[in-house]
Image (spheres, grey):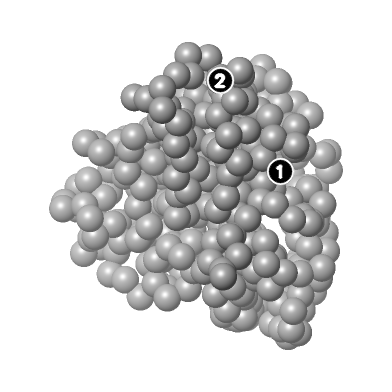
Amino acid sequence: MTKPDPVKQLDMKALEAYFRTHVTDFTGAFSAEKFSGGQSNPTFKITAGDANYVLRRQPPGKLLKSAHAVDREFRVIYALQDTKVPVAKVYHLCEDTSIIGSMFYVMEYVDGAVYWNSALPEINSNEKRNAMYQQMSQVLADLHAVDVDSVGLSDYGKPGNYFDRQLSRWSKQYKLSEIDSIPDMDKLISWLQQNIPADDGKVSLVHGDYRLDNLMFSKTSAQIIAVLDWELSTLGHPLADLAYQCMQLRLPAHIGHSSGLGGVDRQALGIPSEEEFVSWYCQRAGLAKIDNWPFYLAFSFFRLAAIAQGVAKRALEGNASNEQASKVGAMVPPLAKMAVELIEEHQ
């Protein structure tokens, strides 16, 4: 007999009782359905009568320190409720792990469209594709313009050089998750450590995983109606988000769970080049130019590879939240290779 997957299971009786006590106007027949996405924090659609909610939980099992911080997700989404950044309404955070076995929070169910292919084949006009990418740059600039003091997030990150902190954190996480030695990762980490740009003092709220499939668009327009998956958000350098988005667009279709634009004729689809996208962002963010762009891109490849390695390690230990998670580990060598090639091109 197949053992139930603890990642997919919820204690429905305990959860329903908790919802009826802690979530306002929660009535009607209760059910839950796990979304197929969300490899890091399992995400469920909760239905009660005619109302829908979303539940995000930490995965069960032993977790790396600071990983799967759904309480941080809840905090940042709550803080952004009245800003220009589109987010879902959050209702409740449960830090009592005895209810379903891990911490979780509840937010509204936003009915929109999420796209997994950066070429946007579902969109039938170049004009709309272009407008969607314009929206992506606008929302990113709006995020980085948030006054963190006024929204109560002044202590949401640590002081000091963001890239120095992040490189230290993800290098340690990578080593803890390492399964096999990958020479390109070692070479990449060494180069990044030796080429961290001087701290320019820029600090903003950063999403940490800003990409197409973490954005929910209106079903009828190019408007972004919700930015999703805030687990990696912190106070940091805005160019980290910009480079991460551009790195995602450089990826070929066969790497990862969402398709990049490597080898795609962007102009034929109405999708901006990397230079155009960066230019749009700079105009909206009031930047004249960007120095050290190769470093920011290489760092983005490294961090994604480190995250993928963590997913692969959890899959090996049996507590990843997606049965496809073990395949994510195969991303690490090609990501490291692409970063090393990028570095060598600019030396």
For residue 304, what is the image quadrant? bottom right
Cα gap from disc 1 to disc 2, whole angstroms = 18 Å
Q: Identify the residue at image location x=52%, y=69%.
A: 324
Give the labeled residue for mark 2: 20
Side (left or right) of 65 relative to 37: right
Front residue (pair 111, 115):
111
Instruction: Residue lying at the far front in this picture: please name it.
Output: 1
Give the labeled residue for mark 1: 101
Q: Secondary structure at mark 2?
A: helix
Instruction: Residue lying at the far top in this picture: please name it.
Output: 25
Do the residues under discs 1 and 2 have CB atoms within 8 angstroms?
no
* Mark 1: few/some/many CA within 10 Å (<14, 14-19, 20+): some
For residue 243, what is the image quadrant? bottom right
Regarding residue 271, the answer to whether it shows in the image is yes
Q: Amino acid at mark 1?
A: Gly
Q: Amino acid at mark 2?
A: Arg
For residue 250, what is the image quadrant? bottom left
Q: Identify the residue at image location x=55%, y=53%.
A: 8
Q: Quadrant of the C terminus?
A: bottom right
Regarding residue 70, the answer to whether it shows in the image is no
In the image, residue 81 sits, relative to residue 69, either above or below, namely: above
Side (left or right) of 241 relative to 319: left
Question: Measured from the top left, where is residue 96 in percent x and y?
Answer: 75, 32
Side (left or right) of 210 relative to 153: left
Question: Measured from the top left, where is residue 297 in percent x and y?
Answer: 59, 63
Instruction: Residue lying at the far left in this picture: please name it.
Output: 124
Q: Quadrant of the N terminus?
A: bottom right
* Mark 2: few/some/many CA within 10 Å (<14, 14-19, 20+): some
Front residue (pair 252, 146):
252
Q: Identify the residue at image location x=27%, y=49%.
A: 130
Counting residues from the start of the chain, the first of labels 1 and 2 encountered is 2
